[in-house]
Amino acid sequence: MTPGRTQQLNLFAVGQPPCLRLVDMPGYGFAEAPKAVAAAWRKLVNTYLAGRTNLKRVMVLIDARHGLKPNDIEMFDQLERAAVNYQIVLTKADKLPDGGSAMRTRSPPRRRAGPLPTRSS
């Protein structure tokens, strides 16, 4: 898989025996995708996230070079309406002119994310 090219749900079992499942979903910026394809991806992601009671945490990857975009805020709002914990993960901070040092000194936005659940929760 090439980063930034995910077009379907990709599931990964982690551990032996598997104790965690990671799901790689299409991004929601869809910058270079035709509108019909982007709409299909958006529906796929929304359908997957809706009513998934066993979903413990969504990691939202944000390109530090571009910061938060309106699509990101929409995703946070959708996750909050669905009562899904999420965590923001900044990517590509090493590509910033200062090597990301300014990003490390800022406080993250205060939203709904809480501690990661343990296996017993």
Image (tube, helix red, strand yellow):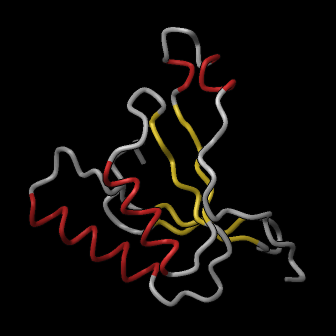
Residue at 58% in and 75% down: 84
Residue shown at 64%/16% (left/top)?
101
Q: Quadrant of the C terminus?
A: bottom right
x, y (%) of residue 34? 9, 55
* Residue that protrudes farthest toward the top in the picture: 97
Please give the count of numbered marks on the rendered protein: 0
In the rendered image, residue 36, in percent from the top left (x then y), is placed at 9, 66
Which quadrant of the structure image shows residue 7? bottom left
Q: Nearer the viewer, residue 121 or 106?
A: 106
**Which residue corresponds to the image point at 55% horizontal and 25% vertical from the top-left?**
93
Judging depth in this view, the residue of 63 and 74 nearest the camera is 74
Q: Position of residue 29 (x, y in %)?
A: 28, 50
- Does residue 109 sit above or below 90 in this rendering? below
* Above or below 1: residue 36: below
Q: From the viewer's perspective, tell me whether residue 40 is left or right of residue 77.
A: left
- Front residue of this view, candidates 89 and 108: 108
Q: Is residue 42 above or below residue 109?
A: below
Task: Please tell me in which quadrant of the rendered image residue 18 appears.
Answer: bottom right
Report x, y in % for residue 75. 41, 63
* Left or right, residue 39 beside residue 72: left
Q: Is residue 96 left or right of residue 112?
A: left
Q: Residue furthest right?
A: 120
Query: Position of 117 compared to 36: left or right?
Result: right
Q: Nearer the viewer, residue 41 or 17?
A: 41
Q: Which residue is rendered at x = 36% and y = 55% of the image?
A: 27
